[in-house]
Image (cartoon, rainbow, N blue to C red):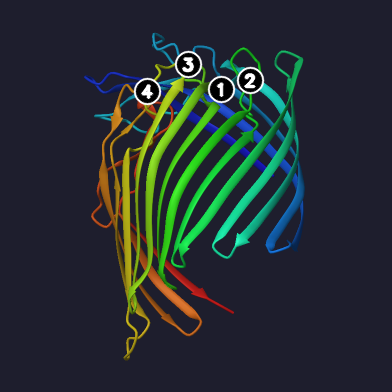
């Protein structure tokens, strides 16, 4: 269960020459409850020389989301001079300018309760043909019903959807340290968003293909290289015009490769490294140009984290860590009207462990680099990254 109430000013339009940023206000309250149950049965058996690991299960879920969205009647009309919330100049800000106290000026854009009931049944069989050749075959059936009680318009709407989602995989080991794999899967998930016309969004459906190779050079060092394609339809996103509601991207496709390396390369010296190249774009849409890139998804991203811990002597257990995190430039919105620049962030750590206790200091953004972490609903809601941050920790294992 989660109850959340947000009372916030909202950035509307920025005059980049003068620095004047118009703002408005909204009240947004949500009460979220979820009840879930999952049961699984497993069995291991052989059919001749073929080994099976059978999994049968089902899950039930009921969730309710009740809330409202209130804003002034002149919301999003940037021509209004005497707004509910005063504007602010980003070059010469005057803080503590509060919204007008008269809440009677606020009107409801939404006031509703959404109930989702989901039943899922799944069956999976992991089949070992030989010691070095294994198959995975599974299927899941979902039935979901969504109901919306619109208190503002005194109306009710509902929709029901059923879906079968298969998954197939194969793993082959030509030699013991090397595993080559391939998989195909479908996915299904209901959307909780509501369109501005009051109708429900159709569920999100996805298809994924993946191939890869995994090597285990020794018990403490592994490397994985994978290539994939994920296609999803009806992905919900905030309506850029009426942010109390949602819209759906018709179809989004992501293609890419990922490389992950982790393990102990020398006694006491550990490394975790990752690189990804991703091409995420809109492939079908009625609202945005086909070919536009998905916001906040960099084409290139890489990270490296290393730690060294002294293995002997009076300072045994003392360790140091150093890491780098690189993110390439990314589109800031679905219209691709602006980009968030690339950045490199450096993290560091010092720690000490003895017997069953450990203490440490982690430093995030060591050189206090200014960067933008993400954008939420376009250019006026870009979120800066955290500055230099020092976090201490102490833990005991019993």
Whichever of labels 4 and 3 marks the residue nearer the N terminus, that label is 3
User: Is residue 2 toward the left or the right of residue 215 in the image?
Assistant: right
Q: Residues within 10 Å of mark 1 (few under 14, many from 20)?
A: many
The residue lying toward the viewer, choosing from 212 and 315, is: 212
Quickly name the residue at label 3: 241
Q: Which residue is the site of mark 4?
A: 292
| Distance Cα–Cα, label 1 vs label 4 | 24 Å
Which is nearer the N-term, disc 3 or disc 2?
2
Residue 255: x and y in percent read: 41, 36
Image mark for residue 244 = 1
Instruction: State yes or no: discs 4 and 3 in contact (Cβ < 8 Å).
Output: no
User: How far is mark 3 from mark 1, CA to CA?
Assistant: 9 Å
Residue closest to the far bottom: 313
Query: Helix, strand or loop at disc 2?
Result: strand
Q: Circle 2 sits on which residue?
A: 110
- Element at badge 4? loop
- Tell me how far mark 1 sits from mark 2, CA to CA: 7 Å
Q: Residues within 10 Å of mark 2 (few under 14, many from 20)?
A: many
């Amino acid at each position: 269960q989660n109850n959340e109430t947000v009372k916030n000013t909202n950035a509307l339009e920025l005059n980049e020459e003068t620095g004047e940023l118009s703002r408005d206000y909204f009240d947004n309250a949500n009460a979220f409850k979820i009840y879930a149950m999952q049961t699984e049965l497993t069995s291991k058996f052989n059919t001749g020389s073929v080994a099976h690991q059978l999994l049968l299960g089902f899950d039930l879920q009921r969730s309710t989301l009740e809330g409202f969205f209130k804003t002034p009647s002149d919301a999003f009309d940037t021509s209004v001079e005497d707004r509910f919330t005063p504007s602010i100049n980003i070059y010469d800000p005057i803080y503590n300018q509060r919204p007008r106290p008269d809440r009677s000026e606020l009107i409801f854009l939404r006031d509703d309760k959404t109930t989702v009931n989901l039943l899922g049944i799944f069956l999976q069989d992991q089949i070992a043909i030989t010691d070095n050749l294994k198959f995975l075959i599974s299927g899941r059936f979902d039935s979901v019903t969504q109901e919306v009680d619109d208190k503002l318009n005194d109306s009710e709407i509902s929709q029901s959807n059923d879906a079968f989602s298969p998954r197939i995989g194969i793993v082959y080991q030509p030699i013991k340290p090397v595993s080559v794999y391939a998989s195909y899967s479908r996915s299904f998930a209901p959307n909780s968003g509501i369109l501005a016309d009051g109708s429900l969004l159709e569920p999100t459906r996805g298809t994924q293909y993946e191939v890869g190779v995994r090597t285990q050079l020794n018990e403490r060092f592994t490397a994985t290289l994978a290539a994939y394609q994920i296609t999803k339809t009806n992905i919900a996103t905030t309506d850029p015009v009426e942010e109390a509601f949602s819209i759906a991207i018709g179809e989004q496709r992501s293609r890419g490769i990922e490389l992950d390396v982790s393990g102990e390369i020398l006694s006491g010296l550990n490394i975790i490294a990752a690189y990804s190249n991703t091409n995420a774009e809109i492939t079908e849409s009625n609202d945005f140009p086909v070919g536009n890139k998905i916001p906040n998804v960099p084409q290139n991203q890489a990270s490296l984290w290393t730690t060294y811990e002294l293995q002997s002597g009076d300072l045994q257990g003392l360790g140091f860590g150093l890491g780098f995190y690189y993110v390439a430039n990314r589109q800031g919105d679905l219209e691709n009207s602006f980009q968030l620049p690339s950045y490199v962030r450096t993290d560091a750590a010092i720690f000490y462990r003895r017997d069953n206790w450990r203490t440490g200091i982690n430093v995030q953004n060591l050189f206090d680099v200014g960067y933008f972490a993400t954008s939420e609903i376009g250019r006026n809601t870009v979120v800066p990254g955290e500055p230099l941050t020092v976090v201490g920790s102490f833990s005991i294992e019993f």
